[in-house]
Image: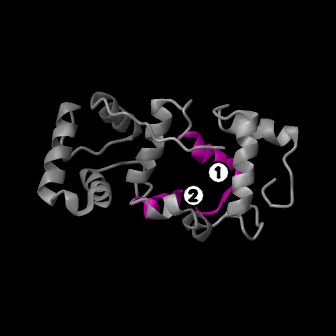
Amino acid sequence: MGNASSTLTQYDIEEVQRHCNNLFSQQEIVSLYQRFCQLDRNAKGFISADEFLSVPEFAMNPLSQRLLKMVDGLNFKDFVAFLSAFSAKASLAQKVEVIFKVYDSDCNGKVTFNDMIQVLQDLAGSFMSDQQREEVLGQVLHEAGYTKESVLLLDDFIKVFDHANLKMEVEVPVD
């Protein structure tokens, strides 16, 4: 499983479905496998950062460099597990967990005010001043019961997203 010349068996499909908590149908997994094989140009069984950057939507994403840290070297099963957070069937907690990892750039399991400011800077660029970013983020944290000095763990991060009533409507088309 994972190189362009191989095919998925029914067992492989079911194993991948279990690995991604059944968030994709069997047909969707087959479609994702075809896409995976297209991206895995050298048929190594995993996708490199350069291969991910060949997807224009990914390359143009302002968070692409942060995302590359999460996706470089994924095999097919892990590729599907990563994408499952963007499935229409994924829970808010599953989606926020991936976002948390984007914000947690040093992979220490904690997100600081500065981590969040950096992501906002990547996302907003020159459309927001440093002061505006700090004010908006400070207000969101305050409304959820945190301060600029707070260090957020995943559960805290979920609470901030839940309290701010933010919608997570990012989905990856699989056909």
Is 2 drawn above or below residue 158 in the view shown?
below
98 left or right of 148 in image: right
Give the quarter of the figure containing the C terminus: top right
- Callout 2: helix, strand or loop? helix
Q: Going by the picture, which residue comes out furthest to the front?
A: 175
Give the residue drawn at x 27%, y 32%.
164
Give the mark nearer the N terminus: 2 vs 1: 2
- Give, as a single range, the part of the protein colored magenta: 63-85
Q: Which residue is mark 1?
A: 79
Residue type at tag 2: Val
59 left or right of 46 in image: left
Give the residue drawn at x 30%, y 29%.
165
Few, some or many C-alpha atoms within 10 Å of disc 2 (few <14, some 14-19, many ≥20)?
Answer: some
Is 49 drawn above or below residue 124 in the view shown?
below
Q: Which residue is mark 2?
A: 71
Few, some or many C-alpha atoms within 10 Å of disc 1 (few <14, some 14-19, many ≥20)?
Answer: many
Question: Where in the figure is residue 5, as x and y percent of width and height?
Answer: 86, 61
Q: Are marks 2 and 1 in contact (CB under 8 Å)?
A: yes
50 left or right of 130 in image: right
